[in-house]
Amino acid sequence: KIKWIYQCKDGYISWRIWLGSQGGKTRAMVEWMDREGMAYELKDVSWERLGMDDVSQQQLEKWEARFGQFFLRHPKDELFEDALKKDYTLFPLNSPQEILENEQLGFREFWVEVDHPELSASLTSPGAPFISSETPWRIKGRAPLIGEHNDEIYCRELGLSGDELDALRQNHII
């Protein structure tokens, strides 16, 4: 079993040990660790030649512990920036507040305000997953309220009668 989540200096990241044809991704991390004197036995591993069948769970856990020690010395933004520069896979695990404050998402105006008349307020919501001049994206409205489309789904789509829908409500099924 491969570990995917590691604690770092200011939170958590997602990273994994890659072997074989993807072993260069692991080597890039090991090279950084080596520059800081933390690679130890990892710098002698043939990451590109090994397959998962060649590594015992005990060996994998030993390597993961070594990487984990390194990650604890660095903030997630620094780790992520290095991954972008050197083209290996590593992602910060951000809190909701960190996602809202993300510079890239702010720059591309990802967040949109959506009116919620039932709350007499607007709420910040995720916007367009991509930007395209040929197929402009727009938000149609707020997310549905709980049970808002029950009549449409249960009666028109699934064919239940009004009485059957009422029975589901009365028995707290929906």
Image (tube, rainbow, N blue to C red):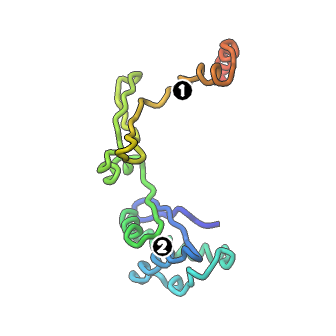
Quarter of the figure with the C terminus: top right
Near mark 2 (Cα within 10 A), the count class, few <14, some 14-19 or many ≥20, is some
- Residue located at (35% from left, 50% from top): 105
Q: Position of residue 117 (x, y in %)?
A: 38, 22
- Residue located at (50% from left, 62% from top): 14
Q: Position of residue 169 (x, y in %)?
A: 64, 18
> Is 153 in front, or is 56?
153
**Which numbered tag is attached to residue 146?**
1
> Is 168 in front, or is 157?
157
> Is 142 in front, or is 95?
142
Q: Kindly state the secondary structure of the residue where label 1 is placed.
A: loop
Ranked by sequence position, the earlier of labels 2 and 1 is: 2
In the rendered view, would you say 5 is above or below 95?
Answer: below
Nearer mark to the viewer, of 2 and 1:
1
Name the quadrant containing residue 167.
Answer: top right
Q: Position of residue 139 (x, y in %)?
A: 40, 34
Count of number-bearing discs: 2
In the rendered view, would you say 150 is above or below 44?
Answer: above
Amino acid carrying label 2: it is Gln
In the rendered view, would you say 159 is above or below 105?
Answer: above
**Which numbered tag is attached to residue 77?**
none
**Is 61 on the left-hand or right-hand side of 68?**
right
For this orientation, the residue located farthest to the front is 134
Quarter of the figure with the N terminus: bottom right
- Residue located at (39% from left, 39% from top): 137
**Which numbered tag is attached to residue 69?**
2
In the rendered view, would you say 63 is above or below 169?
Answer: below
Report the Cα–Cα distance between label 2 and label 1: 45 Å
Q: Kindly state the secondary structure of the residue where label 2 is placed.
A: helix
Amino acid carrying label 1: it is Ile
For this orientation, the residue located farthest to the top is 163
